[in-house]
Structures are given as structure tokens and as C-alpha cells.
Image (tube, rainbow, N blue to C red):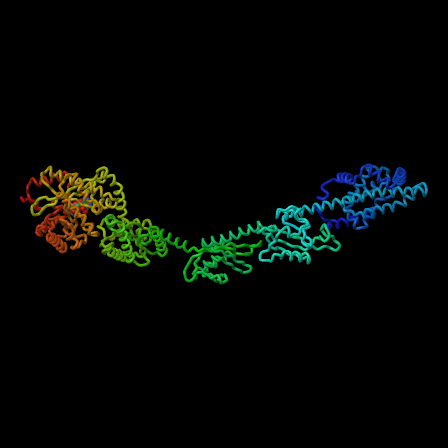
Amino acid sequence: MRVRVENKLRKQASKQASKLVSYPWLSWVHGMKSVQGLVSSLVHSLGLDEASISNRKAFLQFGRDDIERLKRLHRALEELDHPFAEDFYEHLLQFEETRSLIPDTATLQRLQASQTAYFDTLTAGDYGERYVHHRLKVGIVHQRIGLDPTWYLGAYAHYLVGLLPTIHQRLEGGHGELIATLQSLIKIVLFDMSLAIDTYNHASKQTILALKRYTELVFAHIPDGLVVLSTDLTILSANRAFLRQLDLDPEQVHGQPLLSVVRLEQEFAPPDSFIDLAKATALDHSVHQDLIYRLGKPGDTGGKPVSVTLTGIVHEEGEEGEGEGEGEEAGLLVIIKDLTEWERQERALRESQAMLIRAQAVAGIGSWSWDLAENHLSWSAETYRIFGVTTSQAPSCGAVPVHSEDLSMVTDAWRKTLEDGTPYNVDYRIVPGGETRWVNVRAELEVDADGVPLRAVGTVLDITDRKRADDKIQHLAFYDSLTNLPNRALCLDRLQQAISAAERHRETLSVLFIDLDLFKHINDSLGHATGDRLLQAVATRLRGSVRRVDTVARLGGDEFVVLLQEVREDTVTAIAEKILAALHRPYFVDDQTLHVTCSIGIALYPRDGEDTQALLRNADAAMYRAKAKGRNNAQFYTKDLNRKARERLQIQEEMYVALERQQFVLHYQPQLDLQSGHITALEALVRWQHPEHGLIAPDRFISVAEETGLIVPLGEWVIRQACLFSRQLEATLGHPIKIAVNLSARQFWQSDLAERLAGILQQTGLAPARLEIEITESMIMHQVDQAILTMCQINALGVSLVIDDFGTGFSSLNHLKRFPVQVLKIDKSFVSGVPGNADDTSIVAATIGLAHNMGLKIVAEGIETDAQLAFMREHRCDEIQGYLFARPMARSETLSFIGSYIEAGTRWDGASGLLSRP
Ligand SMILES: Nc1nc2c(ncn2[C@@H]2O[C@H](COP(=O)(O)O[C@H]3[C@@H](O)[C@H](n4cnc5c(=O)[nH]c(N)nc54)O[C@@H]3COP(=O)(O)O)[C@@H](O)[C@H]2O)c(=O)[nH]1
């Protein structure tokens, strides 16, 4: 039998596991009390004290006789080894309802033991408080495990029925004793049962009460308002949330018609529509959800927004209504959800959406989204505007007017985004209405759990202005704002590219470094505005002198560079000459005619340098060579120029110190009047008495001093020293001799030149008539009017003016006649050709004639031979200067030379050394 029982239990256990249902609220109903605790509270609530127990026994007529009879029965049964408990459980396992309470063998054994004890105590004779508590405990346990009283009583019956034959068999004393014992047994069993039923009843009542409390608690804590109405819309119950919604007390609502307590108004609906709908819902048991109303108290206006759900309550057949009075059956459940916060959030959302749309419009940002699964594209109003598409048109990729040149780039980028999910961020051109504009389009993909793209969300921004600004910045960064030519940075870049290309293709190129001659004087005297316009005109002429493919750049100031994809020296020479001629043509700027020349240095790649620095440096050195060669010419770079350039740099650095340390000295070269044989003037010529290199000739440092501006203090020093020397001569020899001083262009174009000269004359005390200023034609030709003004100011001081190097500076006769000069000095380059060179001879003769015709004195310089002297005498040249008569001499030498000459009182007669009395 044991095996049978265990098999049944094994099957039972597997079924049981799948049927277990959890009722968490039940533990709440019973609390976490122990069985003993429950027994105590049960005793207390049933009032089971000693008197009550005695009273029960008295009612059952259970007395001492019964106890004695049961004790005797107990002893009779004690000797019997009857498996009551096993039978009992065998019987329980026959029925699903009882079997389900015994999940396993261990439970069975435990229950069998307690059941044996139970039966044992039934007849043991102790029926006091301990017995009662034990029976209550059994009842509680059975009720707790869910054993219905039916099964409890049935099981008891099975036990008793099984027990009776045994009692009959074992009990001594005859029929009367048997009947009396059975009566006692029935009494004690019914005593047990009354306790068990009390336990069940009590537990059920507690459960119902707990459930009620539980339901009420849940109902009360639902955040939405809940109202149960009768079919005539009387309020049967309302939860706390509902009362809070309208600040009401429970007494104000219970039993009241709903609409006497609240006002529910629906926008655009007749006032009674809620009543009609609610009644209909209660009748047809329908459900109406999410009805939007304004909830308030009757008589108030406005109210809070609520969402109302109406549910008609269906009663099961025989189910009693919830109402308290007749006709008050629950008919309708109203759930009222407060939407105040939702409405606030909605409004805030709408406001922020409106703000976003506005901000997007202000910022010119359009937004768009593309549902890839549905292939549905949507654009914001700003997106339509940017793409130039009318809002009546459905958005589509095809509607975007992408510039044909950007189309493949746009589609490639999009394909990449779809392939690997990289964010899309592309600038491209569109042509809405034919006008080219720039947009920046960005997008990010939304993908599902498998990474499959679902949606693309993005923005579109009109960046046309930014692109234009970028272009402008780019232009400003790489183009000279004055001439619109490439600047130094772009020039270097182009040169680098040209070098790379030339290297790749084994080609050559030329770099022409162009510097305007004496441009600074134009700037200083006519102002920067005029200078700027002249530079613009020069830039235009440079551009017009070369091909479109060649680069013309402005490095800054009056420096330009031309890059030519050409290296044949004769071609480059031709282009350089073309540039020289183009730039030399007169300019008409600000109603005046200006003349400017330039000096060009040329370096060839790869011969003269293989990188940008070397090529530019060497072209620059060649340009200085051109300057040194008298300006207005072009020179190719030679290796020797590097040495010269270094030397120039050294000179430049050392000259400042030289001026400070008074390393400059003046030599003087006399000029002789051919008619009288008198020394009429001395030309002051500066030299640099260098501590290491000895005496340095002015050719090596005057142009450097001009570039650095040092010529101004140096020139002033020369004038002052010359004036002082003239004073000393006069004082020593008692013989007044003029002093001639060379003026550089930079000095000449000082706006206060006349004042400075006046100051020196005053400080040295030299009579202005004893000072002669030598200027060159090229110095004054580019601004004739201004030059004439300065010359007049000098003349006004009483100082005479000489045009030096006459014949080399392209001065026109027209200009010459306007110049307030007193002397022309024929350049030694013409004198050297006399008398052998017919051209030079004619020029010198013509110049002498011209000077005389204009009432000017003429001086021939560079007289080295008797023939030249004779020619000058023959053509009635007024004065001569040259090595034949005297070389430039130091101060002391000059003094003694002139002293001897005067003292001798003779007339010099050329190389024969013949001196005759004048
Ligand atoms: N702005 C200034 N320029 C100056 C100053 N001192 C000199 N100079 C200029 O330097 C150039 C070279 O001058 P220098 O080496 O002194 O040469 C002068 C004479 O020595 C030379 N000369 C004179 N006679 C002869 C001759 O018979 N043969 C010959 N080969 N050379 C001769 O000519 C130079 C004088 O020329 P010029 O001034 O044109 O009269 C020179 O251009 C000077 O102007 C200075 O202080 N300031």
C-alpha cells in the first residue's frame, strides 16, 4: 500500500507544480502572523475562554462520564495496531481536491504523524484549553492550505466509519456501554467540528474584510478619479483622486446625482450630451474611452481638462448590485484622468515646436525625415523654401535641384551612409530657379536591432553666404587686395607647383623679380592714394605683358614677381624688355602724368635654384644688379651676384655703425672754368673709411643707403661737412669756391628739403650762392610738377641747381625748359666717346649748344684726355671736371692743391702739364 501511495504522490507532485497559483494579496490579508498567533487572535475574537468552552460542552451534554468512557476507548484502541492514518490518507489520495494538498511523500509522512496524534488526542480524555487550541490550530492549518470544510468533514467521516467496527469489536461492557461510548465519541467529534467550523467562518470573514480593505485601498490609491454611478447617474462611490480633483468631501458626493456635484463640458457638444452618453453606456454596457471634457463644479467656468472613460457595468446573473438602497445598482464606472499636466506639456511642446520652426526659419535651417521602409519623405517649410520647391509639390529627392556637377558626389555620399551608417554631412550646390546656391545637408540613420536602416532624419542649411564669405576670405588670404594679383603666399604656392610640374616633366621655368624704381618717392610726395592707383596701373600692365597661363603676383610694396613657363634666355629677355617698355610708358593718375621704370632680376629653374626660396632669392639679387646698373633694365642671375648680395647685406648692417662712428669722409674734385682757368667749384664725394676694408667707393653703398633710408642722415651730414669745408677754404685761402653736393632721390623728395637746406646754410654760415645741388633727370622725371616746385624752393634760397648725368634720363626738352636749373652736367659716358665716337661727339656738341641756347652753364665731367679737353674748348664748354685735371681728393690734399693752384697764378693746360698765366 505504501508503494501505491508513493506512486500516486509522485504523479501528483508533477501535476501540482504546474498548477501552483500565487495570490500575493492573501499573505497581505492574513498578515505575516504565525499559526500560534492566529490561534491566539481566534481565541480572542471567538471569545473562547474557559467559561465559553464549558458552555459549549454543557450544550453538547459532554460531562465526566463521557470523558471516562472515551478514556476507556482510548486504552482499548491503544493496544490495537490499526493503520488508521494510512487508511485515512489512502482515502484522501483518491480525490483530486484532497490529493492536491499532499505534494510529496515527506508531507504525507508529516501529515500522517500529526493525524495519528490528532486521533490519539480525540479519546485521550484531556479536553481543556490545550485541546481546544490544538483543534483551532488544525482548523487554521486546513483553512490555510485551502481544504474546503466539505473535504474536512468527509475525511472525518471516513475515519469514524472505519473506527466503529473496531470499537464494536474491542469494547467490553455490552451493548449499553457501546451505545454510551459512541454517544461520547459523537459529542467530542462534534465539539471538534464546531471549533473547525468556527475557524473556517472566522477565517472567511477575515478574508472578506481584508479583501474589502484591500479593494478600498487600491481604489483609493488609483491616481485617476473613479466614480461608480447608478444607472440614473447617482454617485454610489468615488475614490480619493476624484474628490481631490474637485476639492470635495465624501459626504458631498455620495448619493448625489453626478451632475449636481460636477460639471463636465465638451467643446462643440450640446450641454446634455454627457448625460445622454452616460445613460446609454450604462444601459448597453458599452465602453467609451478618451472623451475629452472640461471638469469643474456646477456654476464655475472653465475647469481642468480631463479624459473620461465610461464603462457600463455588467452584472452576472444573480449578482447583487453595489448600491446601498433600492434601485441603486452600480450601472456605470466613470474614470476621470486629469490632463492638466498633459495639457501643460502639450502646450509647452507646441510652443517649443513653434519656437523651433521659427528658429529654424531665422537660422535658415530646414529639417526633413525619410521613412526608408515606407519610402516616405517629409520636409519642413524651411526645407521647401531652401530647395526652392513650392509647398504644393510632394517632397522627393528628384525635386531637389542639385547642381549637375555635384550629383554623383551627393549620391555616392548617401550610398555610403546607407552602407556603413556614417553620418551624412555634405556641402553641395543647388540651382533653384537657375541661381546657384550652396547647401549643407546632414542626416543620421535610425536603425533597428539588426542594424537595418529605418529612418533618416536630417537638416538642410543654406550656406551660400558662408561659402561666399569663405571664398572671400580665401581670396583675401591669397590675393593682394589692392591689385587683385596673387599675393606672396599664393605666389610661393604657384611657384612650388610650377617647380613640381617642371621637375615631373623635366621642364624649366623662369622667375622675374620686378621692383619699381624710385616708387617710394612717388608715394612720399604724392601720397599713398596716388601711389596705390599707380601700383594698380602697373599691375594691369604687367598682366597685359604676359600670357594668361603665366603668374603675375605682388609680393608687397612695389615688388612684383612673374612666373613664366619658359626658359630660353632670348625669349625671357624679350618678355622682360616688353615689361620694361610697358611699365615705362607714361601713367595718367589723378590728373597728372607720372613716369616710372622698373628693375628686373631673372632666375631660371633649375639652373639658378631648385626650390622657391633659392629662385626668389637669386631673382632678387639679379634685380639689385639691375638697380646697380642704373635701373630700368633686366639682369639674369649669375653666381657672382650671390657674393654681391651677401656683401650688400653686410654693408647694410655695418653702415649704421659707420655713421655713428663717423667713418664717412668727403673727397673733393675741382671743376675748372675753361675760359678763366679758375677753379670755380668743388664736387663733394663721399667715401667710407672702413676699418677693415679701407676706403670704400660710394657706388658700393649709396644705393644700399637709399634702400634703407640711411641716405637721409648721411646726405645731410655730407651737405653740412661740405658747407663747413667751403667756409674753411674761404677763410684759409681768402678765395670763395662753390661747393657742389649730390642729392639722392630720397633726399630730394623730402617735403621739407628746402627748410633743411636753409637750416644747414644758417648753421654753417655759408652763403647760399656758394652751394650747388646736383640732381639727376631720372630723379625728377616721374613727377615733373612737384619736382619743379621743390627746385623753385631751392632756388629761392639762393642755391643753384645742376642736372647731373645729363643725357641719360630721357628728359624731354619740353620739361627741361621748365626746370629752374642753372647748370647741365654732361654725363661722362658721352664724354668718354669724344672725339672718336660720332654719336657721342654730336650729342656732346648738341648738348653744349642746347645749354647755351637755354642760358645754362654746361659742365663736362669725366675729362680724362687732352683730346676731350680740346673738344670742350673748341665747342665752348664752360667748365670741365675729370681725372685729367684732378681726381677727387681728401680734405687736406684738396686744400694744398687749391692753395698751390691759386698761388701759382697759372692757367692749367691739360695733360702736357703746361701751365700758363690766365
Ligand atoms: N647722393 C650722393 N651721391 C654721391 C655722393 N658722393 C658720391 N656720390 C655718387 O656716387 C657715384 C660715384 O661717385 P665717385 O665714385 O665718387 O665717382 C665720382 C668721380 O670720381 C667720378 N669721376 C670724376 N672724373 C672722372 C673721370 O675723369 N673719369 C672717371 N671714370 N670718373 C670720374 O665721377 C663721379 C662723379 O660723378 P657725378 O656725381 O655724376 O658728377 C656718383 O654717381 C656720385 O654722384 C654723395 O655724397 N651723395
> Disc count in the image?
0
Q: Residue furthest front?
A: 299
Q: Residue furthest left?
A: 917
State which quarter of the image contains the C terminus.
top left
Q: Give left or right: position of 4 versus 592.
A: right
Residue 125 seen by the camera: yes
Q: Give left or right: position of 679 versus 151.
A: left
Q: Give left or right: position of 188 versus 509.
A: right
Looking at the picture, tell me which residue is in the foreground, 71 or 908.
Answer: 71
The residue sitting at 21% across, 50% down in the picture is: 630
Q: Residue furthest right?
A: 174
Looking at the picture, tell me which residue is in the foreground, 43 or 313.
Answer: 313
Where is residue 329 shown, x and y percent of the image? 71, 53
Where is residue 256 shown, x and y percent of the image? 67, 50
Where is residue 260 shown, x and y percent of the image? 64, 51
Looking at the picture, tell me which residue is in the foreground, 514 or 769.
Answer: 769
Residue 170 seen by the camera: no
Looking at the picture, tell me which residue is in the foreground, 97 or 605.
Answer: 97
Where is residue 436 shown, x and y percent of the image? 41, 59
